[in-house]
Amino acid sequence: MLKLNVQKQTVCSQSRLITSVRWVVEATNGLLKTWKALGNVMANSHIPHIGDYVRIVAALCNAYRPPRKNIEEDERIMAQRMIRLSRQSNTLKIKVEEKGWIKKRVIWKEMSADDLQDFPRLMFQELCDLTMGIYQLKQTKSYTKEHIDNQGLFKIFLHKESSDILRIKIQSRHTASKIYSLWIQYNSTTVLNWYCQCKVGARVVGCCAHIASVIWYLTYDRYQDHSTRRVLCDYNNYLMDADVEGHWSDNNEENGD
């Protein structure tokens, strides 16, 4: 079973590496298809020569077109880090399963207002480094707002013996009736490890949106000044049926009102 879990985690991490370079691949394919020869359906007689056509067009693009992506030094460092992490296992997931933390309840206590004073405070760029990009962070604002509107924020529990471990219960992004548990390990300067019960929650190359939402709030958003944040109104309260008496109707239009 442990070997199977490691294999699933490896596949998950490898898929994250593929996703990170997918845009460049798709953009390059789009550039090749701007050439008429490659952008339309070819006759069967041209099939043996397609490889030659692609190499010719690619050479012309490399010589006379700007690159699809300019690689910066910090991006090279992140790429190397992603490759290194993809070969590692999720140590927190192993600990959760070996110690049976999923089923045990007595070892957890619900967080109070005075807890988590030692949880790290991070800059936004540091969050991007943790999540390996900005994709998950773009979803965190609306996702966190859903939890604030419904039942307070997250239901957070502290481990009674390991003060550096959090357990959080959070609603699935896709199914309202499904609740996931996730675990986060941290120290005073950064977030060390994470694990979520969702399909991609065991990845170590970045994290799932559930974990990103919790980390984003605890390390960054709760320290921001929200007094100037634009308030979104619920305009459904102001929309009324057009047939209601006293409002616009066909009679008004006939009378020229």
Image (cartoon, helix red, strand yellow):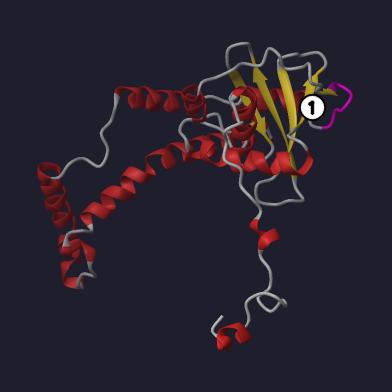
Q: Left of 110 or right of it: where is 149?
A: left
| Numbered disc 1: secondary structure | loop
- The residue carrying mark 1 is 101
- The amino acid beneath tag 1 is Trp
Residue 26 drawn at (x, y percent): 33, 50
Between 96 and 162, the one nearer to me in the picture: 162
Quadrant, the C terminus: bottom right
Horizontal side, residue 160 vs residue 74: left or right: right
Magenta part of the protein: which range?
103-108
Residue beneath the point at 58% across and 16% down: 190
How many numbered markers are drawn?
Answer: 1
Q: Magenta region, mostly helix, strand or loop?
A: loop
* Residue 143 in the image: above or below residue 45: above
Image quarter of residue 144: top right
User: Where, quadrant-wise, is the N terminus in this rendering?
Assistant: top right
Q: Residues within 10 Å of mark 1 (few under 14, many from 20)?
A: some
- What x and y, as percent, mark residue 223? 61, 22
Q: Quadrant of residue 146?
A: top right
* Front-most of residues 212 and 199: 212
User: As drawn, which residue projects farthest toward the right?
Assistant: 106
Q: Which residue appears at 43% of the width and 23% of the height?
A: 81
Furthest-bottom residue in view? 254
Q: Residue at x 38, y 44 (%)?
A: 22
Q: Residue at x 62, y 86 (%)?
A: 251
Residue 49 at x, y = what percent?
Answer: 15, 61
Q: Is residue 14 above or below residue 220?
A: below
Q: Is residue 35 visible?
A: yes
- Tell me where residue 64 appears, x and y as whole percent: 10, 44
Q: Nearer the viewer, residue 123 or 204?
A: 123
**Res. 200 in view:** no
**Based on the displayed image, in which of its 4 quarters is residue 113 positioned?**
top right
